[in-house]
Amino acid sequence: MLWTPEGAAGARPLILMGHGGGQHKKAPGIVARARRFVTEGGVAVVAVDAPNHGDRPKTEEFARVAAGLRAGMAAGEDVAPHLATMHTFLAGPAVPEWQAVVTAVQELDVVGAGPVGYFGMSMGCGLGVPFVAAEPRVRAAVLGLLGVDGLTEAAARVTVPVRFLLQWDDDRVPRDRGLALFDALGSADKTLHANPGNHGETPESETDSSLRFFVRHLGQGRRVRGTRGTSPDTP
């Protein structure tokens, strides 16, 4: 899915949004955030189904990895190793796919070859950290709601400005592991935003803050009224 301002023309910042585990490119949170970024920041936003999510077929290997995660959760185990296995499995194909999506979308007249940002929480962070580490076109990223497990090496290669979100009472990600991921990021320009509440209770004010962060580091597109959502054939 690609969202652009109505009447958009010429190059503008592009933000790739990674969805959470079990979600998809048109999840309500993705759509709401994309519309705000487009209408208030004048940027373009693109979201893609992660491998084995949304409209994409699910493989037997994914089913096996997912079953291990579910079993660990049901048994009350530390699920961090299971999440790390899942994210590593998905990031392998996701990173080159997302790089190809950015290339294809930037060839469209309504987007152009402007600066690129990345936004991803939870699984979107687990796949986003290796993507940001590997993609030189990304100039800023908003990440968070995930621990350091399996991401130490990739996080060290992230050098762009980062806004990191952490829920202080997260019921899925232990606080110390979230803080460890923030610490592992190689960026000299990184900021931690911690809010009270569980995993899915990030306040709406962080959407405002994230948009200001991207505008500061990527610039602002021409602000026009309304948005246009499309499903490009090429990406």
Image (tube, rainbow, N blue to C red):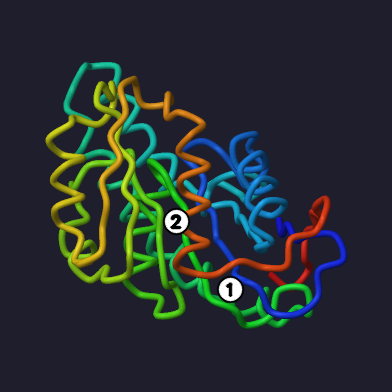
Q: Position of residue 89 (x, y in %)?
A: 35, 55
Mark 2 or mark 1: name the one nearer the start of the chain: 1
Residue type beneath disc 2: Phe
For disc 1, the marked residue is: 102
Quarter holding residue 109: bottom right
For disc 2, the marked residue is: 213
Asked which secondary structure carries label 2, the reply is helix
Residue type beneath disc 1: Val
Local crowd at mark 2 within 10 Å, few (<14), some, or many (≥20)? Answer: some
Asked which secondary structure carries label 1, the reply is helix
Q: Quadrant of the N terminus?
A: bottom right
Q: Position of residue 177 (x, y in %)?
A: 15, 39
**Which residue is drawn at the image coordinates 39% and 36% (left, top)?**
66
Left or right, residue 157 beside residue 180:
right
Q: Quadrant of the C terminus?
A: bottom right
Label at residue 90 = none
Left or right, residue 84 beside residue 213:
left
Looking at the picture, does residue 194 appear above or below residue 88? above
**Which residue is drawn at the image coordinates 50% and 53% (left, top)?**
212
